[in-house]
Structures are given as C-alpha cells and as structure tokens.
Image: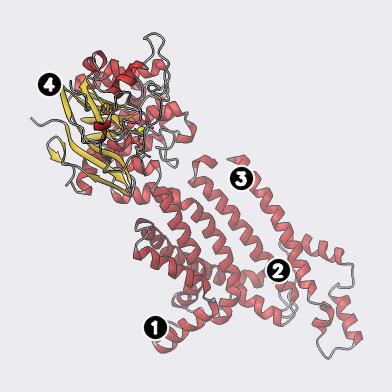
Amino acid sequence: MSALLEIEDLAVSFGRTGAVRGTSFTVERGETLSVVGESGCGKSVTALAVMNLLARGARRTARAMRFQGEDLMSLSDSGMARLRGNDMAMIFQEPMTSLNPAYTVGSQMTEVLRRHKGTPQRLAIDRAADLLARVGITAPGLRLGQFPHQLSGGLRQRVMIAMALMCEPKLLIADEPTTALDVTVQAQILRLLAQLQRDLGLGMLLITHDLGIVARVAHKVAVMYAGKVVENAATAELFASPRHPYTQGLLRCVPVPGKIKRDEPLGSIPGTVPRVGPDFEGCAFRERCSFADATCTQDIPRHQAGTTHDFLCRLPS
Amino acid sequence: MLQFIVRRVIVALLVAATVMTLAFILTRLSGDLAVSIAGPNATQEDIELVRKAYGLDRPVTTQFFDWAGRAITGDLGESYFFKTRVSSLIAERMPITITLGLTGLIIALLVSLPLGILAAVRENTAFDRVVQMVALLGQAMPSFWLGLILMITFGLQLGWLPISGTGSWQHYVMPGIVLAFSAIPALTRLTRAGMIQAMGSDYIRTARAKGLSRASILLKHALRNAAIPVVAIAAVQLGFMLGGSIVIEQVFALHGVGFLAWESIGKNDFPVVQAVVLVLAVIYVALTMLADLMNAVLDPRLR
Ligand SMILES: Nc1ncnc2c1ncn2[C@@H]1O[C@H](COP(=O)(O)OP(=O)(O)OP(=O)(O)O)[C@@H](O)[C@H]1O
Ligand code: SF4
Ligand SMILES: [Mg+2]
C-alpha cells in the first residue's frame, strides 16, 4: 500500500527567495512526522505547498508529491478541493485571523461537513459541539453561536483544531497548533490527537518550535534549515545521536527537562537563518557552523546514518 | 446594538437640523425674496404688500423658527405658484424620483458588483486594467451629456426606448442608466479593492483549506466581507442620485421632485425650493444612517 503522504524534492520559490529547496519526506498512516527548525526555515511554506494553498506569486515544483498514491502536482483544482478539509485538513499558524469574522463558529464548522459529507445541519451541529467539547471548550453550545471576535486567541485556535477534525481527515497538517494554549489544554489536545491516531490511523505533519512536544508525540523528525531538510531520523534516535551540526546546535540549546520554558525560540545558535536564492550552492548553514571549511560551498552529499536516519553535511558519518 | 442605534439617530438629527438651517439660509441668499416674487413690473407698494402677505417683514429668526417649527410637524407651507400644499406637491412627485433613484442604484449594483469581483479575481490582467480604465472614464463623463447621447442613439435613431415622460418602465431605463453611470466607478473600485483584500486574507485561505466551492469562497466568504464598505457607499450614492435627479429629470422630462425643484426655482416659488432641498437632505441623512445600520448587520464586530 502506498504511503499516506510522499514528497520528493519539493521546491517553492518566491521570486529570488528559495523558501523550500528540495525537500523529501514521507508520512505513513497513524504516524506523526514533526518538522522543526528556526523561524524562516520554510516549515509553513512546505505545509502550504502540500495543501496547494501558497500565496500568489509562489512557484511550486516537485519530482513527486503523492497523497494515498494520488499525484497532487497534476491534480485539478476541483480534485484538490475534494481532498481539502475532507481527507487532508490543516490548522494554520495564525489562529487570530484564520476564521471569517462575518460568520458564527457553528456556521464555519458545519459547512465543511455539509460540503464533503452532505451531513444535515442538525447532525453537523451535534458533531461540532462534540468536537468543541473534546478540545476542552466548555459550553460548546454557546460558542457555536458566537462570532470569532468574541473568542480569545486560545479559543480560536481550539475552534480551528476542532474544525480541521470535522470530516475525520486521514492527514492533519498542524502548523504550531498549540502556541496560544496553556499547558493543560495543550496536553488535552495532544491526547485527543494521539487517540484519533490510534482509532482512525490519522497521519500528522506537526510543525512546532517546542522540542518537548516533539519528544512526546512525534514518531520521526525532519529538521529544516533554509529550505532544506538537513536531517531525518526517528525521534528517539535524533535526540540520542544527532548528526548534523545544526541539529546538534538546536538540541544543545534545549533546556534541562523540568526547566523547559514554553514558547522559547528553538536554540540560541549565534546568527540567523540566511535568505537564499533557489539555486544557492553548498550548505546554507556554513556562516554559522563551527565545522565549516572550503568544501562546504560545494555540493553536499546526503549521508545515511541508519535505515531511517540521514543527514546533509560534508562531514562523513 | 441599541446604544449604537441611539447614537446614530442623534447624529442624524443634528445633521438634519443643520441642513434645515442651510436650506433656509440658501433660499434667502438669492436677494430680496419680496422683490423676486412681486415680479419685474411691480411698484414699491406691490413689493411691500407681498412682503407683508408672505410674512417677510418679520425678523429673519422669527421667520426661520416659524418655518422650521412647521416643517418638523410636516407642514411645509403653501406653494406661491401652484397654490396647493407643498407637502402634497412633493408627495405626488416623490414616487417618480424614488423609482428613478432605485432604478439607478439597481443598475449600478448589477454592473459594478460583477465587474469589481471579476476584476479582483483577475487582478493585474488585461481585463482588470480595462475595467479600471472604463471606471476612470465613466467618472469624467458629465451625466447630461451621456443622457443626450443615449437619447439620440437609443431613442431617436434606434427607437428602442422612449425619450421622455413616465408612462411605462421603459421610460426609466435610460435615465436610470445615466444616474447609475455616476455611481458605477466608485462602486466598482470599492468592490474590487474589498475583494482583493478579502481574497488575500487568512480566512479565505481557511475557506480554501476546507475545500469549499469556488462560488462559496468568492460569494459567501469574500464578498460578504468586501460588501460592508460597498453597502455604505451604495446608500450614499443613492442619496447623490436622488439629488442628481434634478438634472436628469429635466433632460428626460420626468415630472419628479427634481423637475419640481427646477420649475420652482424659475418661478421664485421659494417654499417649494426650500422644502425640496430639505426633503432630499433628510432622505440623504436617513440613507447614511441606514447604511450604518446595514454595516452593523453585515459586520458582527460593530454590533
Ligand atoms: N508569501 C510570501 N512571499 C514571499 N516570501 C515568503 C512568503 N511566505 C514565506 N516567504 C519566505 O519563505 C521563507 C520561509 O517562510 P516560512 O513561513 O515557511 O517559515 P517558517 O519556517 O514557517 O517560520 P516560522 O517558524 O516563523 O513560522 C521565509 O524566508 C519567508 O520570508
Ligand atoms: S556542510 Fe559544512 S557548513 Fe554545513 S553543516 Fe556540514 S560542516 Fe557545517
Ligand atoms: Mg511558520
């Protein structure tokens, strides 16, 4: 059986900016792949490229991009619309602005179910109320009748999560889904997602800054830097033996367990992510890397460090 | 919501009071009314008689409060020329003007909403640029000139539409188009700008992420938000159209309120002129208030 989501060599550019430059990964059914990396590494752009929701002016190419074996690159707009919200759903990084100010929570949640499953409004409302309760919203009946501006950021984020789950998607793309939530609610939502994963085989692409969450829920991790996946590994292996200097830098900056501060930026590697062109040559990390030498400006080979572990660095394994 | 309405009503009343004062002052700026009414061949004695008969010998403030006091109760005085109640004169002519204004508004919306939406969807294409250029040209075209062109082409040469009078709905088509023309550029541009802004917003990305149909994304999610400012301007434009009917009714010989005002100016029938200005202004104020209320209905954040 084909994988849930397979991506080979995805590239996205905005004019002279190479936001994503050849990214490959696979998400299996019932599996969580976490994408980590500093701000501006191309995590959101990767997610939006899968959904084909990139802003105007973006150029998207890929050797292959398949969802349940279906080629997403050649899929028509209507074919994509049939999948979106139904088989693949997305939670956006911007919870404050992602709901339509003109419609109630209930109307926005139920329309997706009516659209894809033809569910009658009365039943759709029941499902929406049930999901709101499951993401920890008290008095869901009241919330369904409210408009987005009447809800706090945390509530809006939970509405977005519940809305993404309305049609029981097979793939959930979640871009920083719990940033606006307090720790207890966050734990409740992560439990809910884990349960859906067990019950329905939900596959997840989870983008987060929070390595604590990664350690708890991700089966495998893709570390992104300047538009490239620089290291791929199973979660335990990545934390135990990171191979790429960038990954090592990120992990070195993780605070000691028990003292983990939430919402802190990943790591504190000196310097910032450079903006590079789509045809940038060599390793984009070289300005910040203490192992860098002249060969880092050339083509970098991908090394295998195990059957499911690879990294992109001139240093051999 | 109630507080919102009360606030808007108070503002509207203040504006109406100001307009009343202005309408009164303006008719008096044209010179000595008694002289104009009495006519060119009148003697000084005649003029004094007229002045007494019409109460123009009283202090201006007394005249104002007398007139304003009556106007508030709906008594707009008597026409010097028609010798009937001004209020019944206006009531008789108003349906024509309102029909004309609404026809103009409906035509304007039927043209500018689709044009604006299409231009936004095809932003920066040739279609978009043509729409913007036509909107610009439309704004520069004087309405009486457009009226005459239409009349000559469709009325006289092709004979498709009647060129004057109010006998049937066909009579309203050409004047309606002319009135609409003045509103189309602003409404089109506003629709286009609103749609472009909405289509680039995060909630439209959400709507697309839900796999909604193109029609639902454009009309239910984007237009609903883009329409909020359009509604306000449409109401204001309807006010302009009712005022603009003074010229159009003249061109197409529609005997509405605008035509009445025109006639009365020529005849120095100043109670009528004063009243028409007042009534149109009050309608205008009411429309702006209505626009605010409709905004509140469309935009939950204002409730
Ligand atoms: N619409 C756009 N137009 C131009 N450039 C863009 C656009 N969206 C993203 N980019 C660029 O693409 C790069 C990757 O952005 P992306 O949003 O994917 O980062 P990210 O990894 O999600 O960061 P964060 O952790 O802050 O969310 C950045 O350099 C950004 O400036
Ligand atoms: S390729 Fe060179 S610069 Fe890049 S991570 Fe490896 S050693 Fe550092
Ligand atoms: Mg992001």
**Mark 2 and 3 residues: CB-CB less than 8 Å, in contact?**
no
Q: CA distance from mark 3 to mark 4?
A: 69 Å
**Mark 2 Cα-neighbour bin, 10 Å: few <14, some 14–19, many ≥20:** many
Residue A134: x and y in percent read 33, 21
Identify the chain of the residue marked 4, using the numbered disc in the image: A
- Do tags 3 and 4 sit on the same chain? no
Give the mark nearest the N terminus, 1 or 2.
1
**Is residue B234 positioned above or below B172 on the image?**
above
**Crowding near the residue tagged with mark 4, few <14, some 14–19, many ≥20 C-alpha atoms within 10 Å:** few
A275 lies above or below A236: below
CA gap, disc 4 to disc 1?
Answer: 81 Å
Q: Which residue is mark 4?
A: A307
Q: Check disc 1 and give the amino acid type.
A: Trp
> Marks 1 and 3, how far apart in space?
46 Å
* SS class, disc 3: helix
Label 2 vs label 3: CA separation? 27 Å
What is the chain letter for disc 1? B
| Residue B247, quarter of picture | bottom right
Query: Quick one: label 1 or label 3, which is nearer the N terminus?
Result: 3
Q: Is mark 3 within 8 Å of ligand 1?
A: no
- Residue labelled 4 has its Cβ within 8 Å of some atom of ligand 2: no
Asked if residue A28 shows in the view, the reply is no
Which element type, helix, strand or loop, lies under badge 4? loop
Q: Which residue is mark 2?
A: B275
Q: Check if mark 1 and mark 2 are on a common chain.
A: yes
User: What's the residue type where badge 3 is placed?
Assistant: Ile
The quarter of the rendered structure image containing the N terminus of chain A is: top left
Label 3 vs label 4, nearer the camera = 4
Q: In the rendered structure, which amino acid carries the disc numbered 2? A: Ala
What residue appears at the point 73 percent right and 75 percent down from the top-left corner? B79
Return the chain for callout 3: B
